[in-house]
């Protein structure tokens, strides 16, 4: 059962919300005025992270919970865990995720997960980490893939300005639109529909490319597409 509407707004759950990307999203969503549920394997760590968000965003409606409990707090759940933890985390969420929910997967199968280079990608039998997630979630849960190219270091600083695109893939246009609306709560991010979930393998591959670029140029570059039509 999904719960957690606060002040008429749906809570945004972030599984793995104590990690770099997860915490940065929690911080940005809280700054946008949305209630947030930070999940972690350790509820105490989650609450500590929630406290850090409240310190930076006075009045923020944010709570720290164990991952499975956090996942029940809202209809669109963000999954922000390393590839090595994705399978175990999703297994532990099988009783928490329910039909109608959307899972936003930002996992990248970097070779660093098996002590390899962060500039290399591991092969995933399903085609991508996102497709693996779709195979593992309960029936009726829709996986949308996004946020692979957003720098956690930049996103995690409220004073830092973002100006980049977020490629969103998935097999449901409605789910992608819902996720896009949430992503664009963060100033400077533009959600771009990049196609079906099978395209996620290409988007996930942009992460090691950006890592290589950022190492070489000592920066936190993102992705920006040109030539897209203006929105009405």
Image: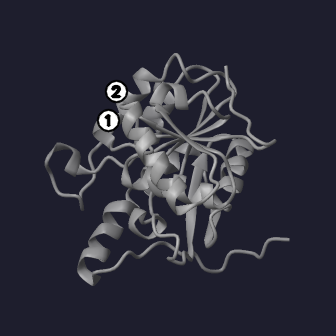
Q: Tell me what residue is drawn at x 68 percent, y 34 percent.
A: 75
Crowding at label 1, few (<14), some or many (≥20) Cα neighbours within 10 Å? few
On screen, residue 46 above or below 190: above
Which residue sits furthest left?
115
State the SS at label 1.
helix
Q: Is residue 162 left or right of residue 114?
A: right
Q: Label for residue 88? A: 2
Q: Tell me what residue is drawn at x 69 percent, y 42 percent.
A: 175
Give the colouring mode of the picture. one colour
Crowding at label 2, few (<14), some or many (≥20) Cα neighbours within 10 Å? few
Residue 23: % across, % down: 45, 52
Q: Where's the C terminus, which quadrant?
A: bottom right
Q: Tell me what residue is drawn at x 61 percent, y 55 percent.
A: 30
State the SS at label 2.
helix
Residue 45: % across, % down: 37, 39
Q: Tell me what residue is drawn at x 68 percent, y 51 percent.
A: 34
Q: Quadrant of residue 215?
A: bottom left
List the residue tagged with mark 1: 85
Residue 97 can be seen in this image: yes
Residue 5: % across, % down: 74, 36
């Amino acid at each position: 059962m999904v719960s957690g509407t606060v002040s008429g707004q749906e809570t945004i759950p972030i599984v793995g919300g104590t990690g770099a990307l997860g915490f940065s999203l929690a911080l940005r969503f809280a700054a946008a005025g949305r209630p947030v549920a930070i999940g972690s394997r350790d509820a105490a760590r989650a609450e500590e992270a929630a406290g850090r968000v409240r310190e930076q965003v006075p009045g923020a409606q944010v709570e720290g919970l164990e991952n499975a409990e956090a996942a029940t707090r809202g209809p669109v759940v963000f999954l922000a865990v390393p590839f090595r933890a994705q399978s175990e985390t999703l297994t532990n969420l099988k009783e928490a995720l329910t039909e109608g929910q959307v899972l936003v997967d930002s996992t990248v199968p970097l070779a660093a997960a098996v002590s390899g280079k962060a500039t290399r990608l591991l092969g995933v039998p399903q085609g991508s980490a996102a497709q693996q997630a779709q195979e593992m979630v309960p029936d009726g849960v829709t996986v949308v893939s996004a946020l692979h190219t957003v720098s956690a270091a930049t996103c995690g600083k409220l004073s830092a300005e973002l100006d980049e695109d977020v490629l969103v893939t998935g097999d449901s246009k409605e789910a992608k639109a819902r996720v896009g609306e949430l992503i664009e709560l963060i100033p400077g991010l533009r959600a771009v529909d990049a196609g079906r979930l099978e395209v996620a393998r290409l988007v996930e591959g942009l992460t090691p490319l950006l890592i290589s670029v950022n190492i070489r140029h000592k920066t936190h570059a993102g992705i920006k597409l040109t030539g897209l039509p203006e929105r009405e």
